[in-house]
Image: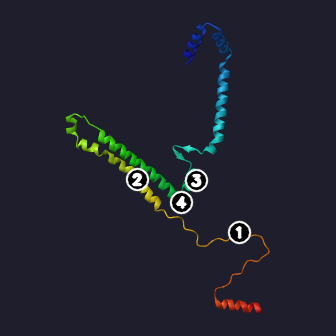
């Protein structure tokens, strides 16, 4: 490294004009101790910045997330409503379905226009009929197509979340009115309450 620097300075010294003398002057004023001190100070500042921000970026250790973050990410995944899950399945299913159809169409036309000019000895060594395989290669597109159909069906079978049977009353406002009393459903209890009022 030092040898390269010396050869570079010699090459610069051989160039005629004011630029090499200016660079030589800058290099003579440059002190090695000062440069190493500046570099070490910058490295210390960078390490302190990394330590300060390490907590906010969540440490990733050996390819695994911090356990607290794993719980948080699982919880966020579980927080999706039935409607969101349904939409996600249907959207991904449609994407996969149309990708598969597009792949099938492409492979169909490719296989029908493909003319194989293979030597007879290679065709004879193959354990299957190569031309017939080339003509049905478009069936590979069925994999993403049927995956998409499955996702769409899975999305359509998700039921909406049931509505609560008991409606919650709106929060009470501050008034001078007393809350309504519970009136019993029984006739005898109602009669007893009426008699108790008369006393």
Q: Is residue 126 above or below residue 166?
A: above
What residue does disc 3 label?
72
Whether residue 58 sits left or right of residue 141 in the image: it is: right
Q: CA distance from mark 2 to mark 4?
A: 21 Å
Q: Nearer the viewer, mark 3 or mark 1?
A: 1
- Kindly identify which numbered label has been placed on residue 147: 2
Give the vertical position of 166 relative to 88 (above or below): below
Q: Nearer the viewer, mark 1 or mark 4?
A: 4
Q: If you read the primary sequence from the N terminus, does the residue marked by circle 2 or circle 1 appear first?
A: 2
Q: CA distance from mark 3 to mark 4?
A: 21 Å
Q: Is residue 172 above or below residue 122?
A: below
Q: Earlier in the sequence, mark 1 or mark 4?
A: 4
Q: In terms of image quadrants, where is residue 163?
A: bottom right
Quarter holding the N terminus is top right
Dividing the picture into quadrants, the one containing residue 175 is bottom right
Looking at the image, is mark 3 or mark 2 earlier in the sequence? Answer: 3
Residue 31 appears in which quarter of the rendering? top right
Q: Secondary structure at mark 1?
A: loop
The numbered disc on residue 83 is: 4
Q: Secondary structure at mark 3?
A: helix
Disc number lying in front (3 or 2): 2
| Cα–Cα gap, marks 3 and 1 | 31 Å
- Sequence-wise first label, 3 or 4: 3
Query: Which numbered disc flags the more N-terminal residue, 3 or 1?
Result: 3
CA–CA distance in space, label 1 to label 4: 28 Å
Q: Nearer the viewer, residue 92 or 193?
A: 92
Where in the figure is residue 127, as x and y percent of width and height?
22, 43
In the rendering, which numbered label is found on residue 171? 1
The C terminus lies in which quarter of the figure?
Answer: bottom right
């Amino acid at each position: 490294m030092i040898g390269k620097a010396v050869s570079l300075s010699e090459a610069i010294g051989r160039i005629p004009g004011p630029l090499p003398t200016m660079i030589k002057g800058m290099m003579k004023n440059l002190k090695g101790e000062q440069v190493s001190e500046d570099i070490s100070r910058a490295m210390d500042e960078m390490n302190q910045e990394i330590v300060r921000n390490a907590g906010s970026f969540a440490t990733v250790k050996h390819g695994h997330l911090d356990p607290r973050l794993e719980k948080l990410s699982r919880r966020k995944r579980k927080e999706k409503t039935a409607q969101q899950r349904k939409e996600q399945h249907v959207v991904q299913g449609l994407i996969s379905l149309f990708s598969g159809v597009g792949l099938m169409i492409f492979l169909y036309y490719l296989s029908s226009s493909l003319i194989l000019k293979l030597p007879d000895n290679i065709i004879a060594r193959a354990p299957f009929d190569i031309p017939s395989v080339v003509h049905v290669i478009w069936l590979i597109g069925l994999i993403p197509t049927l995956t998409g159909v499955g996702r769409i069906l899975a999305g359509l079978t998700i039921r909406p979340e049931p509505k609560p049977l008991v409606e919650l009353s709106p929060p009470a406002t501050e008034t001078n009115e007393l809350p309504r009393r519970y009136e019993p459903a029984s006739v005898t209890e109602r009669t007893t309450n009426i008699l108790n009022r008369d006393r």
